[in-house]
Amino acid sequence: MQNRRDQISGIIERVSQDTRIRQIRIINHRGQVILSTNTEGFSRQLDAGAPGCNICHTGPKKLAVPRALAPGMRTNLEGETMHAFTPILAEPGCITQSCHMNEANSKVLGVIEVSLSLQEMNEALARTQLKMRTAFLATILLGGGLLWLALAFRFQRPMRDVLHGIRQAARGNLGYRIPMRTHDDFGQLAESFNAMSQQLAAVQQKLIQSERLISMGKLAAGVAHEINNPLTGILSYAEDLMEGAEPSDPRRKDCEVIVREALRCRQIVHSLLDFARQGEPSLVSAHPRELVEKALDVVVRQAAFRNIRFLREVEEVLPVVEVDPLQ
């Protein structure tokens, strides 16, 4: 809201120090790069068909029809780099500022693009695939001799099914399943092979998900650390205002709400920093009336609810409950 581009530029520079993040760019709704960690791409003009512009436009034409917008993140994979695009929606508070008064009819003010390197994850997947191929090769060499001897005494069709399943697994197709045609040794072998393939596919998926969580965890930790700085200033000023207000001053309660919610935001930021290890809820004794009152204190001050009168009806006989008030 304060349009301090030097601070925004400093934030994205610090976040981009992670070796996996190749580039961070902020693109306005006209397709112009207004902030970038890569000086070569600064002030570059993108067309409507660029990946970042596809969030709003269906094609490269200037008069493209806007797509249905969603606040979530969209990604585009280019080689060993994943580009994540998040639209900056035009909220009422934005278009009232001097820098966006001429864009009152715009649904989107711009796009934040984060380019993340997937090189380390691809290298880890390559090592995993090499280990699996080695294991499959050993299985083929060991089981091939036994299967060749059994071929003269067993049906050829179950044998072909098993061999085809092994070839599919060696190619990396862990989703292939050997059909269960008999209940003899071949049937048991097919059942064991299908279970092994299912377990290997689950392990491979967990490795991919774990690598993604590590990358997103570092990005989330950097953003959470930057949020702590302005949050500390808000809390300090609110506490000063609360201490300077008289007990009878109606604004004192507003200051108390600001302090309480700022402390809650700080706790949320700390939880974000520790999101890699999911902690247990901190349970305390609390009365339902207190929880309702604190929640309403935040809601009734919002502009959308100023013309609404709230009726609080909480039974006095309700017991004290064990909850985590922050959650």
Image (cartoon, grey):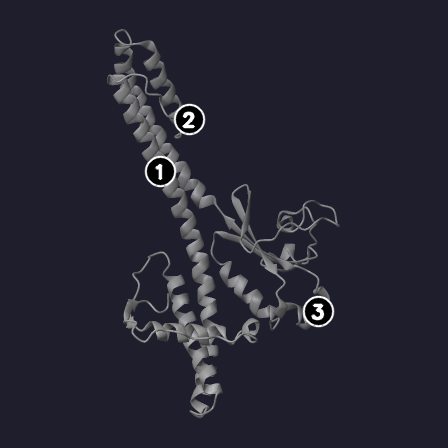
Mark 2 element type: loop
Q: Position of residue 259 (x, y in %)?
A: 43, 79
Q: Which disc is residue 261 wearing?
A: none
Question: Which residue is disc 2 drawn over?
Answer: 171
Instruction: Tell me the CA gap for discs 1 and 3.
Output: 52 Å
Mark earlier in primary sequence (1, 2): 2
Q: Residue at x 50, y 48 (%)?
A: 117
Question: Which residue is disc 3 drawn over?
Answer: 101
Look at the picture and state if 5 lies above or below 64. below
Q: Where is residue 314 in the image (x, y as percent from the top left)?
A: 37, 73
Name which residue type carries label 1. Answer: Ala
Question: Which residue is disc 1 drawn over?
Answer: 202
Look at the picture and state if 211 lies above or below 276. above
Instruction: Tell me the CA gap for discs 1 and 2.
Output: 17 Å
Specify few, some or many for label 1: CA neighbours under 10 Å numbering under 14, 14-19, or 20 or more: few
Q: Which residue is drawn at 63% across and 68% down?
A: 92
Name which residue type carries label 3. Answer: Met
Specify few, some or many for label 3: CA neighbours under 10 Å numbering under 14, 14-19, or 20 or more: few
Q: Position of residue 288 (x, y in %)?
A: 34, 71
Q: Which residue is drawn at 26% across and 22% down?
A: 188
The quarter of the picture where the N terminus appears is: bottom right
Mark earlier in primary sequence (3, 2): 3
Q: In which quarter of the image is residue 93?
A: bottom right
Specify few, some or many for label 2: CA neighbours under 10 Å numbering under 14, 14-19, or 20 or more: few
Name which residue type carries label 2. Answer: Arg
Instruction: Tell me the CA gap for discs 3 and 2.
Output: 58 Å
Marks 1 & 3, CB-CB < 8 Å contact:
no
